[in-house]
Every structure is written in structure tokens, then in C-alpha cells.
Amino acid sequence: MNNSFNINRFWLLVGRQWSENKKSYLFLWIVISLSLMIFSVFSEQIGLELFILLFCFGGCVVITTVFSSWPDFGRSSLYLLLPASLTEKFLCGLFYGIILFIPVYCLTYFFITYIFTYLVILLFPNNLISFSEVITDGINKFTFLPFSFYIAVFLAFLFMQSLYMIIIIRFKKRQILIFLLTILAILVLYNFGMNILMSNIVHAPKGHIRTPGPLLTFITADFGYIKSIYNPADFESFSFIKLIWKLNDLIWFIVFCMLYLTAWFKFKEREL
């Protein structure tokens, strides 16, 4: 089988993947829906962070259905021997992990957070506003957030999913543990390096630099430092111009595309 792409073969592979894993997809959707229900109840306390983490980890889980038997070389060879090109097999995983998962998650989030929650509350005596006002408020919240926020969430999604794909293809055992340790190591080393860099730029006391934090600079491209050791409240921050922000997002997007390409090469190594 050559490595060319055939759209008919690709859709046949997508259909086969659905028929073999529809129970897994349904179970994942139920878990995400129940999690969103719980998060919606405590939304005032937890903020958006858990919603974003659920989105990112859900994207990692759904991609494993394509490589569900990967730790077993005997069973995984059945997938590799399918009459489809390597590109079609790899894009089938991205179809379910990105193109299909993202809109399904967004629709589920909107339905659970606004429609389902509103209908449940109607079962009890209340003085709620009308249903149309609830939906309008929900749409306004989506449009109120800046586009840069959605770009940041999307980049976080690509970062975690592409890295997880490399790990599940490369390693046979303890993939989740390796994934979590790798994420932790990348974030610690990145922020440590940025702390050293910013210390040399602003000449602030060691340990008093605020770096971009746990989700790299595609979440926030600004920095800050404490000007006085004796007054922690004496804090100064600065941000880059919009052009630098856009360039920053573009660079990270290219980096994550390279991670997906690395996963493709790892996939090719397994096929060989």
C-alpha cells in the first residue's frame, strides 16, 4: 500500500473506526457530560480551568481509540495491515480527535451548562428569567471572551494531544505516567529558563520574576517582577504588543504541528 491519500478509503476507515469504537465514544461522551454537570453546579468556585483541562484530556482520550491496542504489537499489527495508507490511518485519528471532538465538546458544554441545567431547575419552585434570556446570556458569554482566549485553549489542546500521541505510539507501558511526567518536566524547565532570561533582562532580585506560568506563553505573553524585596505588593508587569502576541501564537502553532508530524514519523516506524 503506497502512502497516497484516497478520500474514499479514508471515509471507509472512518466508518470502520466508528463501528468498532462507538461504545467507547459514547462512554467518553457520558463521562464528559456528567463532568460538565458537576462543574456547572460549582462553576462559581472552580472557574474555567477545569473546563479547559476536561477539554484537553478528553482530546487525549479520544485519540487513544485509534491506537487502543498499541501496547500489544500483535494486536496493533492488525490495524497497521489494513488496506489503507499510513496518512489515511493517521488522519483518521485526527478526524476523531480534533475535527469531530471539538464541536461535539462545545455543543455538549453549551447544552449542559445552559439548556439542561435550566430544564432541571424548572422542576423546583424558582423565579428564573425566561429560557430565551438564558440562551441569549450564554451566547453573549461566548462572544464576550476575546478570540485570543480561544486560540490559547486550542493551542493548549494541540500541545497535550500531540505530545500524548507521540507517547502512546512510542511507549508500550505506563503511557499515562510518562505523559504526566513529561508535561510536568516541560513546564518546569520552560518556566525555569524563562525566569533566568527575564532576570537578566530586568535585573530583578532572583526569585522575584513572574513567568507565564503553568501553560506556557500561549496563555499569556506578559511578564512581571517584584521591584522591592521588602514590599511584595510593589509589583510591575508589562505585556507585548499585539503583533508579538500573534507571532507568539503562530510560533507555538508551528511547534505543535511539528509534534504531530513527529507522531506521524513514530507511527511510520511502527509500521516498518
Image (cartoon, rainbow, N blue to C red):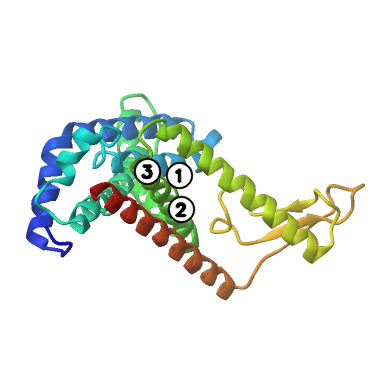
- Residue shown at 79%/63% (left/top)? 200
- Picture coordinates of residue 85 (x, y %)? 16, 57
Q: Nearer the viewer, residue 87 or 143?
A: 87
Q: Quadrant of residue 57?
A: top left
Q: Who comes first in sequence, dot 1 or dot 3?
A: 1
Residue behind mark 2:
153
Secondary structure, mark 1, is helix
Q: Identify the residue shown where x is 11% and y is 62%.
A: 7
Q: Residue drawn 42% across and 48% down?
A: 163
| CB-based contact (under 8 Å), mark 1 and mark 2 | yes
**Residue 92: image x %, image y %?**
21, 51
- Residue 59 vs 257, above or below: the answer is above
- Residue 140 placed where, x, y %? 41, 55
Label of residue 170 in the image: 3
Helix, strand or loop under label 2: helix
Question: What's the residue type where badge 1 is placed?
Answer: Ile
Q: Which mark is residue 236?
A: none
Question: Could one spot residue 47 in this view of the protein?
Answer: no
* Amino acid tagged 2: Val
Judging by the rendered image, the residue that carries numbered circle 1 is 52
Q: Residue furthest top?
A: 124
Toward the bottom, the furthest residue is 243
